[in-house]
Amino acid sequence: MNKNGDIKIKHGSSSLSEFIERPLPSDAEVEAFDQYVAHEAKEEEVKSSLAKIYQNDKGEAVNVQTLTFKKRRGWLFKLFTFLVVVFALGGALYAAYNYVSLKLNLNKQPVSLAIDAKKEVAAGEEFNYYLTYKNEDKVAIKNIEIKIAYPDNFIFLEADPKPSLNNNTWNAASLGSRRSDFIRIKGKLAGTLNSDNIILADMTYTPENFSSEFKKSADFSIAINDLGLDISLANSSSALINEENEISVIFKAKDRNYLNTFRLTASHPDEVEIIKLPDARATSSPPAAPLIKAGGQDSWLISNLGKNENTFKIKFKVKEKKQPAVSLAIKFEYPYAASAAEAPKYYVFYENSLTYEVIKSDLNINLIINGSPLDQGVDFGQTLNYSVSYANKGDSEMRDVIIMAVLESDFLDWQSLNDKNSGAVSGNTISWSKTEIPALAELASGGQGIIDFSISLKNLGPIDLAKAYQVKSYVSYSIAGKSAAGQSQSNTIASKINSDLNLDEQLRYFNSDNIAVGSGPVPPKVGQITGLKVYWTISNSLHELNNLRISAILPAGVSWGAKNSAAIGTIAYDSQSNKAIWQIGRLPAGFGKTSGEFNISVAPTDANLNQIMVILPGTAISAKDSVTGAQLDKILKAKTSKLENDNMASGDGIIQ
């Protein structure tokens, strides 16, 4: 350092000692140097910021000494911009309003048309359709026309207001805003069971502020849930050429019946001839036959049915074999005429087609079971009585005829076979030849004979629904051990086994858990009241049942109690008939068991003293098998004061 304080650096060699000998800066000098560096950095930052301010968009320096003024937009421009924005927003709002309004109007129906009536009716039952039309619009409607298309089997009776045209068209001049009106149509349906009957209505109108016509439509469906008649047919499945065949038509009016008159018609092909019998009438039990008269070609008018079950037999012949089978259609038709001057129109409410295999043979064989050649219902354990009739209808003698009866079933008790001709049994076949019946050695033209035998069905066992619960029976023949020319088989009879309906009845003072459910003395005493309970249990698993009903007459000294209940149906007391009745109606197949119970009071009189008193004289159960068509009727043994089903209370039952 010289005298002026400058520091001089000498270039050239140096030594460590020379470096160490130089003085270090003081703390004040270091602090002053830091402040200087910070000041310089701040000035650089300010300069950089000012440089950015005085640059144009391209990063070039601008001359701040010259000012350039940019022209501003005026108030007209702002007003124009404002109006554009307002119109744009208004258009968007208007479009949104129209969209929402359209969506709402799609759901809003300013004019409506509706039909109301019962959902279900019985055939022939009178009911009303109600057609209501409303105008919810702000303006009236005019030139109103309502036109209706009725179901095919609808019978028009009357309407209010009256139709303008043809019982199906109504005209109205106008209907005011917020107003409504209706049309009532009275009629009835005569159609088949469970059919859906649809009515259609169209309404046309013109709003007062429009010139265009608008249309509204409506529809409504009513089901026929009851015919008021129980109808069934019994027939065989085959028909012999030129032999008399028959169809048993069975019908019974229900308590709720509106078809007390009908026409019964048999439609058939040309090769079938209906046999006109002068004494053709229905039979009923007890005898009280309805009125029957000819109703046209192969038809009969039937009226005054009464309450009994009726059987009307239609007899026919197949004159020749044109085809393997023939069909006959059985129809029930309800006649209706609006006035005596008009011919009645017929409405079909029941129809069934029966198909017969046509059999042609020189040896006519006819099979009858239990007195009938028709398919029939039979019971477990029942004896089937067979009768086989045969006749040589050919022109020549037949030699060495063999007749074979085929009985196809898993439910026959072959040990019970009773055959006085001792036919040979092999599997499910019984055969007779000249060995068993010498007349079969030479059967002359016109020769005939009858073979009778019987066999029983097995008793009820475990139900196996995979099996066919029936006996299919037919008879065939051969000549000299060879099949005969042409057909050689009789009519076939299907004997379907009725359902396993059973009623268990118990009269108790103590229930099955030995808890008292009765009251008063046991055995009953004269002058005192003994309360007892009746238990009914129904079992059924094979077929569906209809019109199922259980009834028990309450004799003198026995009266209806309270606390009656049933799992299905209703148990009630009929005071007019003095009966306890369990009304069930339909019981589906496989339902198993169901039960009901009710209380009775027993009040013995002096006439019952020292005697066993009959409390339930014989409960009756009835139903119709939906598969076999058979009427099932059973009457149980009487129940007495001995209380046969109650081990806790049973005794001699003698009234004290």
Image (cartoon, rainbow, N blue to C red):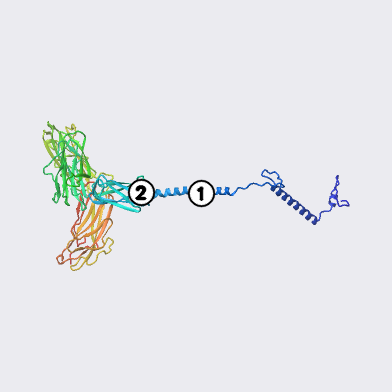
Image position of 57 (left or right of 627): right
Q: Nearer the viewer, residue 513 or 538?
A: 538
Residue 431 location, x and y as percent?
17, 38
Left or right of residue 83: residue 243? left
Query: Which residue does the numbered mark 2 point to in the structure image?
Result: 208
On residue 356, the disc is: none
Mark sitting on residue 89: 1
Answer with mark 1 or mark 2, whichever residue precedes in sequence. 1
Q: Nearer the viewer, residue 533 or 415?
A: 533
Q: Is residue 641 above or below residue 252?
A: below
| Dot 2 crowding, Cα within 10 Å, few <14, some 14–19, many 20+ | some
Between the C-alphas of marks 1 and 2, the distance is: 35 Å
Q: Amino acid at mark 2?
A: Glu
User: In this figure, what is the number of numbered marks?
Assistant: 2
Outermost residue on the right side: it is 3
Q: Is residue 444 left or right of residue 16?
A: left
Amino acid of disc 1: Leu
- Residue furthest bottom in the image: 527
What SS does tag 2 mark? loop
Residue 336 location (% of width, % of height): 20, 46
